[in-house]
Each structure stands twice: as structure tokens, then as C-alpha cells.
Image (cartoon, grey):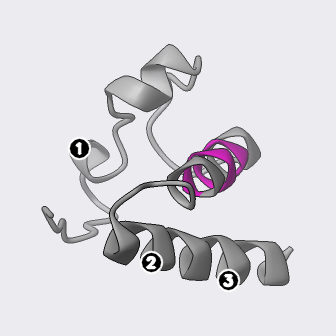
């Protein structure tokens, strides 16, 4: 799995990837739409057959839902 460093001065740090673009997220940076996109994506990944991915997605989803 790739890791990326967040650099607030760089628009490429927060540039939407292909899945976000398909979900009509086009602007770099953070937004409610992007937050919702990731919550939905993580929820989908909780059903992954790879146990490690499923568990990480579930933990991440729980953190996001506890935050809001």
C-alpha cells in the first residue's frame, strides 16, 4: 500500500484521485463532499475479502463516524 506525505503548500497532496473524480470530486483540498466520499469508500472496503484491509477500513470508518 502506498503512503503519501501531506504537504499543505502543494495542490498535488490533496488532488482527487480517479475514484474521487468519478464521484464528481474535482477540487483539491478538503471538503464535506470529500469527507463523505471517503466514509462511503471505507464502508465499501469493510466488505473486502482481504481481512487486513477489511479491518483497517472498519477501524478508519469508525474513527470518521465518531468524529462527526
Q: Quadrant of the N terminus?
A: bottom left
| Image: 36 above or below 5 | above
Which of the two discs, 1 and 2, sits closer to the camera?
Answer: 2
Residue placed under numbered mark 2 in the picture: 56
Main secondary-structure element of the magenta-colored stretch: helix
- Near-viewer residue (4 or 55): 55
- Near-viewer residue (50 or 4): 50
Between the residue at mark 3 and the residue at mark 2, the CA separation in whole angstroms equals 11 Å
Total numbered labels: 3
**Where is residue 52 drawn, in percent x and y?**
34, 77
**Where is residue 61 drawn, in percent x and y?**
65, 70
Q: Secondary structure at mark 1?
A: helix
**Mark number, residue 12:** 1
Q: Which residues are magenta?
A: 36-42
> Do the residues under discs 3 and 2 have CB atoms within 8 angstroms?
no
Residue placed under numbered mark 3 in the picture: 63
| Image: 67 above or below 2 | below
Amino acid at each position: 500500500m502506498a503512503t503519501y506525505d501531506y504537504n499543505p503548500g502543494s495542490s498535488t497532496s490533496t488532488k482527487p484521485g480517479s475514484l474521487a473524480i468519478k464521484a464528481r470530486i474535482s477540487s483539491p483540498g478538503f471538503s464535506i463532499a470529500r469527507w463523505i466520499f471517503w466514509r462511503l469508500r471505507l464502508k465499501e472496503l469493510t466488505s473486502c475479502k482481504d481481512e487486513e484491509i477489511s479491518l483497517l477500513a472498519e477501524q478508519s470508518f469508525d474513527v470518521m463516524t465518531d468524529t462527526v
